[in-house]
Image (cartoon, helix red, strand yellow):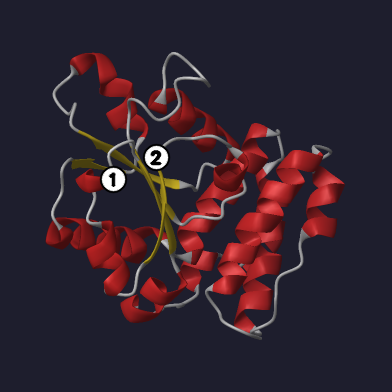
Amino acid sequence: MWPFQRQKLSDVSLEVPLEELRKRARIAVVDDDLNAFPLRVLVREGYAIDYFPSVTQLDPFERGLYDIIFLDIAGVAPEWSEDDGLAVLEHLKERNPAQVIVAFSGQTFDLSKSRFWKLADDTLSKPVDAMTAKRCIDDLLARTMTPNHYWGGVRALLLSEGVPEREIASIESAVVRAVTRRTRPDVRGVVERVCANAETIAKVAALVAKIAGLLGPP
């Protein structure tokens, strides 16, 4: 009988207004051409955007500090890999399946770069005007800055570690209970019992914290 008692995040209504998501979201633009993205206009509109001409450190992106990353395919990470932006995208998606990445490039029709477009959550050709960039950001915030999106990342991480579906359902139920009570989910201890990988445990905790962050202060 217990499976029917499990609660899912998809059963919980947690709609956050788009205006609030804009205030909370952190966005990164990684491109060697500052003029390709309407950074100043969107910052004036209230979006929190950090600009990086290249990837000198992976840590800020690995830790999930940014809700959306606009990533160019060339000229941003040649010292990391000959695959440049593609290597960064693959690495970040492996580290955090819930990380939202927009393929931002002028090489849209280069078939040799097809994996870059396939792995990305969205694509945007450069240069891009402020109206198009704003629509792209708002659409992504509405679609991906949600409990279900972050939980999808948690599921992917746990499944990659061989955690059984039953245990994953139990963890999800614990998160739902906290969500419905408007308290901060603390599932680290539960995850530690079913997963020995400290890095995965930290990633799961960070994604669950994202879910809690959508609730505001408890």
Q: Is residue 145 left or right of residue 205?
A: left
* Quadrant that contains the C terminus: bottom right
Q: Is residue 28 above or below residue 157?
A: below
The residue identified by callout 1 is 34
Residue 53 - label:
2
Q: Residues within 10 Å of mark 1 (few under 14, many from 20)?
A: some
* Left or right of residue 214: residue 196: right
| 5, above or below 88, in the image | below
Residue 58 x/y as whole percent: 58, 37
Which residue is found at the position 46% from the left and 77% from the top?
14
Q: Quadrant of residue 157?
A: top right
| Residue 81 left/right relative to 212 | left
Q: Earlier in the sequence, mark 1 or mark 2?
A: 1
- Amino acid type assigned to the residue bearing label 1 in the image: Leu
| Relative to 198, residue 211 above or below | below
Q: Secondary structure at mark 2?
A: loop
Q: Nearer the viewer, residue 10 or 71?
A: 71
Q: What is the CA distance from the residue labelled 1 to the residue labelled 2?
A: 7 Å
Instruction: Tell me: 172 left or right of 74.
Output: right
The residue sitting at 33% across, 36% down in the picture is 32
Q: Identity of the amino acid at label 2? A: Pro
Q: How far across and how far down the image is residue 162, in percent?
A: 70, 33
Q: Are marks 1 and 2 in contact (CB under 8 Å)?
A: yes
Q: Residue at x 70, y 56 (%)?
A: 205
Report if residue 3 is visible in the image.
no
Q: Quadrant of residue 144?
A: bottom left
Q: Position of residue 43 (x, y in %)?
A: 32, 68
Task: Tell me if residue 121 can be seen.
Answer: yes
Residue at disc 1, secondary structure: helix
